[in-house]
Every structure is written in C-alpha cells, then in structure tokens.
Amino acid sequence: MNIDLPLDGRERTVLREASRTLYGNMHVMETLLVIGRSDRDLFYQAGLANDLGCKANQAGAVIEKLLQLGVAERVPREEGQARGYCRRLPSALWSSVIPFAIEVLQQRTADVAKLADHRPAP
C-alpha cells in the first residue's frame, strides 16, 4: 500500500493528531512523508510550507529538528540564490514513516481521536 500526496482532508487530520500526540508537533509525520516521498533530495522551507498547508515558521521548526538529527543538511547558497535549500540525507527514517503512517490511517477516525494530548495546560 502507498500514500498519495497531497493528503486529503481526513488523512491530514488523522496524521496531524497522531503526529501531535507522538512528536508534540502536528506537522512532523506529514513533513517526513513529503520529504521522504519526493523525487528530489532538495527542499526549502517555503515550498515545504506550501506542500503542508502551514505557515513557513511551522515548516521551519520541523526542518530544524531534521537538521539537528542529521537526516538533512543545509546546502550552501550560491551567489544570487534567494532560497535556502536543504538536502535529505540517506536514512531509514524516510522509508519507515510510510508504513507507520499507513497503519495510523487504517485505524478508524474514532480510535485516532482518542490520541488527544493529555499534557497539563501551562
């Protein structure tokens, strides 16, 4: 089985709830899918935000985590280049998220709704 991108509304909602519960950020799983499934190793913050339907700073927060983990790296800018690109590096992370996302999506929406964030309010 495969996951078609972009995600439809129900799939996006389900993955974002699971991502928020597991990673503390609703955009992580979808980001991993978009970057991991891309034919290109290069990506940039505004393009990723557009693919995810989120704000650039939200996409940037996930990119920073990927850089810290060493599964992506910044590409040096060439003269006159406006965008700051990053490169996906080889990692099991990119392929492992697909079967996990499929597993999450195959659950009933009601079951995933039980994954609500139970952390105490600040």
Image: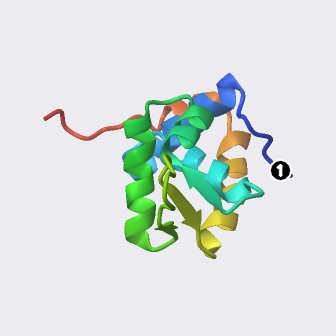
The quarter of the picture where the C terminus appears is top left
Residue 14: tell me if it is visible: no
Residue 120, percent across and down?
19, 37
Q: Residue 87 falls in which quadrant of the image? A: bottom right
Say which element carries label 1. loop
Q: Residue at x 48, y 46 (%)?
A: 82
Residue 41, percent across and down?
67, 63
Give whichever of 116, 49 is nearer the camera: 49
**Amino acid type of the residue tagged 1 in the rendering:** Asn
Q: Residue at x 37, y 38 (%)?
A: 57
Give whichever of 63, 29 is nearer the camera: 63
Give whichever of 115, 28 is nearer the camera: 28
113 shown above or below 40:
above
Q: Residue at x 73, y 55 (%)?
A: 37
111 shown above or below 73:
above
Judge left or right: residue 3 versus residue 76: right
**How many numbered dots are placed on residues in this image?**
1
Residue 93, percent across and down?
59, 68
Residue 29, percent across and down?
56, 49
Residue 8: tell me if it is visible: yes
Within 10 Å of disc 1 (Cα), the crowding (few <14, some 14-19, many 20+) is: few
Q: Residue at the far left: name it.
A: 122
Location of mark 1 (residue)? 2
